[in-house]
Amino acid sequence: MGKTALITGASSGLGAEYARQLAAFGADLVLVARDRGALEQLASRLRSTYGVQVEVLTADLVKPRQRDKVVARVADAQRPIEILVNNAGFGLPLAFESNDIEDEVRHLQLHVEVPMRLTHAALGAMLQRGHGRIVNVASVAAFIPRSTYGACKGWLVSFSRWANGRYRPRGVTVTAVCPGYTHTSFHERMGLGPGEEGVPDLMWLQARDVVAESLRDAARGAAVSIPSWRYKVLVTLARFAPPSLAARIGERGR
Ligand SMILES: NC(=O)c1ccc[n+]([C@@H]2O[C@H](COP(=O)([O-])OP(=O)(O)OC[C@H]3O[C@@H](n4cnc5c(N)ncnc54)[C@H](OP(=O)(O)O)[C@@H]3O)[C@@H](O)[C@H]2O)c1
């Protein structure tokens, strides 16, 4: 491939899987997250398995000085980033009223402000070169009312749709990826053990399938990717569901 991909939240879950699949295509990588040990371990595995170059960029993306290092790396025209994957994220309990408001602000920054800044930084160089690919990891929660998480992911889907329409004719595609429940560290980090989400086994996806389908959709320039038929059908039904039913679905899980 001979191109470089920068992935945020690459230390686990979907981000680590994007790193693995893009390395398998021959892409060099820049891996971003807070956990240096996990990033170094992944980097050395990918270098030895796929023979690609891997840079580790440790950053807490909600801390402005650390985030700006990543913004600068994305904008560096001497070391072009061809694929940007905005993936870092975390969840909060649905009880907005009792969540710490500072946690809510960090959640909003990581899911909305950070991808907006990184997309802005990437677009300058990508548009000048006339090619590039941006993948924004949203969620099926974008299509149902689901506290601030659904609102943040809704922003990302709406922004990606618009940006793809505007920049695709100039060679830069922007794709919002909307996974359903996927086995990663996401739910465990919220303190939920196996089965505690109260979601049937049938609804759980594997990270490797989500990433593979979303990369195929991004490669064909889709504005929105909803991995798996199960969730494609559910999202279509949610579009036509009465608001009270959509609200009940949105209250499922944590
Ligand atoms: N799993 C699901 O069911 C699901 C469904 C739909 C959408 N998603 C979305 O998928 C994306 C990836 O989540 P995941 O499921 O793969 O969860 P995960 O395994 O918990 O991974 C989250 C990643 O984000 C990074 N991260 C968190 N806070 C960060 C910060 N302040 N600065 C930098 N990096 C940070 C974490 O790394 P460090 O801790 O090392 O910083 C980790 O690499 C998220 O945007 C999530 O909303 C997940």
Image: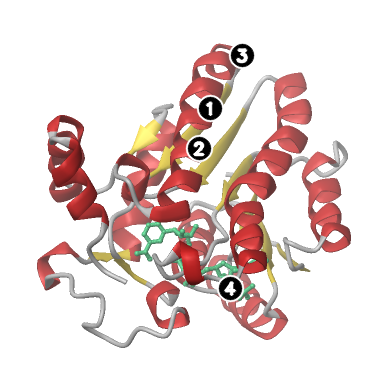
Q: Outermost residue, front direction?
A: 97
Mark 2 / mark 4, whichever is N-terminal? 4
Marks 2, 4: nearer the viewer = 2
Mark 2 / mark 3, whichever is N-terminal? 2
Residue 10 place in picture, x, y as percent: 58, 66
**What residue does disc 1 label?**
173
Residue 51 place in picture, x, y as percent: 61, 65
Q: Nearer the viewer, residue 28 or 167?
A: 167
Amino acid bearing label 2: Trp
Mark 1, secondary structure of its residue:
strand
Mark 2, secondary structure of its residue:
helix
Mark 1 / mark 4, whichever is N-terminal? 4
Ligand 1 neighbours mark 4 (CB distance < 8 Å): yes
**What residue does disc 3 label?**
170
Q: Outermost residue, top direction?
A: 169
Residue 54 place in picture, x, y as percent: 69, 64
Mark 3, secondary structure of its residue:
helix
Q: Residue at x 39, y 65 (%)?
A: 94
- Quadrant where the C terminus is found in the figure: bottom left
Mark 4 / mark 3, whichever is N-terminal? 4
Circle number at residue 11: 4
Residue 62 place in picture, x, y as percent: 73, 61
Residue 210 occupies quadrant: bottom left
